[in-house]
Amino acid sequence: MPTNLIINGTFSAGSTGWSGTDLETNHRETAYLRNGSSNRVAEMDGRSGQTTVMEQSFSVSGDGEIGGTFNIDSALRNASLGQAGQEGFTVEILDSSGGSVGSMTVLPTTNSYSTYSMDVLFPSAGTYTLRMTELGPNNSLGAIIDNVEMLVCFCDGTLISTPEGPRPVESLRVGDTVTTQDGPMQLRWIGRRKVAAPDRAENPKLHPVRIAAGALGNGLPTRDLRVSRQHRMLCQNKTVSNMFGAASVLVAAIRLVGLPGITLDEDPGEVCYYHLALDDHQVIYAEDAPTESFRITRTSLASLTDEGREELLTLFPDLCDTNGPARRDAAYIPPRPRQKSLIRRMVKNRKAVVATAA
């Protein structure tokens, strides 16, 4: 589950958790927008002639680089609509030495809230500071803010095996090399999809599968691993060989739910899913467990965001030619009924998902 690292980002407790200069956090929304709402908000221009700065420090934990998302809702108060395009504030995420790890400018244009977001990559665990600084005419007619969040997505931090050692998935870039069953290969495309908490609440199929450390057998994965329901994991055991005459097969993670240590993660909150595409379908390693790279089909393309699908189709039409010759799969993918049958027989035979080296 993602964690919001910001304290009192809704200002329901006034200035609690916040420091800075010229803070104005004690008024209700209706005082600025005349909409009758008693929701408490903050204004990024408290007094005329003074510059509002709002700060809050927070701690980030984890191994290696840690990815997160900053969100904030902002609107112009009615009296400042004539300053649209000028009035607003800057956002900075600063490390302990004052260096910036993320920044953006927010200039709302209407008296209706919009959400402004930016992705942040923290280079390591430590203490960071969120700083918001007033912009525009310093006449006490500024932007209104609410729902300040610094979310660290729980899928971020998943370690992917590379020839240089394990790396957090969010730190990977196109052109980087990852370890595959067939040797080192370069990443051709990386996609990221966020699933908001309300969407998960409406559609349980958006919940990830949680695979506890060691649940696959042979000590794999080496840490807890979360993947989307249809993301496939490599099964490699004697039951696989008997059923399919192959050393290994790929099975959707949702089929594994119910095995010891493998559950559907129904905790509320936003989740972030990553897609790693190579020149072809490959077995890669997440938390040392064998899994698949992004397999390009009509169905998988449809699962992407519009932006992700358009990017992949535009940049790599050769990878996305689903009408061309069938591409090689990294391992045999049994039909759904056969996957279910395999899991039943594995349970009966007491076979681990990965009973032999991948």
Image (cartoon, rainbow, N blue to C red):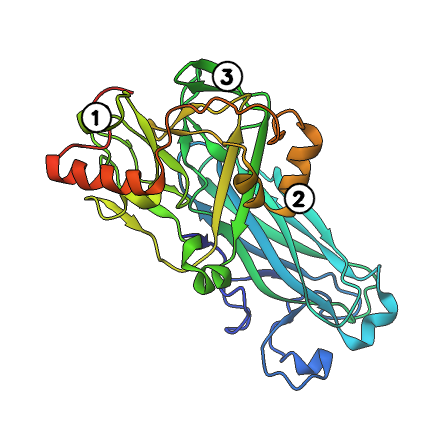
| Three-letter code for the amino acid on which mark 2 is drawn | Glu
Name the residue that disc number 1 marks. 237
Q: Give the distance between the C-alpha atoms of the residues marked 3 and 2, in whole angstroms.
A: 25 Å
The reply to whether callout 1 and callout 3 are in contact (CB within 8 Å) is no
Name the residue that disc number 2 marks. 307
In the picture, the disc for residue 185 is 3
| Three-letter code for the amino acid on which mark 1 is drawn | Asn
Q: Give the distance between the C-alpha atoms of the residues marked 1 and 2, in whole angstroms.
A: 39 Å
**127, 103: nearer the viewer:** 103
Q: Position of residue 123 (x, y in %)?
A: 51, 34
Q: Earlier in the sequence, mark 3 or mark 2?
A: 3
Q: Earlier in the sequence, mark 1 or mark 3?
A: 3
Element type at mark 1:
loop
Q: Give the distance between the C-alpha atoms of the residues marked 1 and 3, in whole angstroms.
A: 26 Å
Q: Residue at x 21, y 44 (%)?
A: 259
Q: Quadrant of residue 99?
A: top right
In the image: residue 59, left or right of residue 338: right
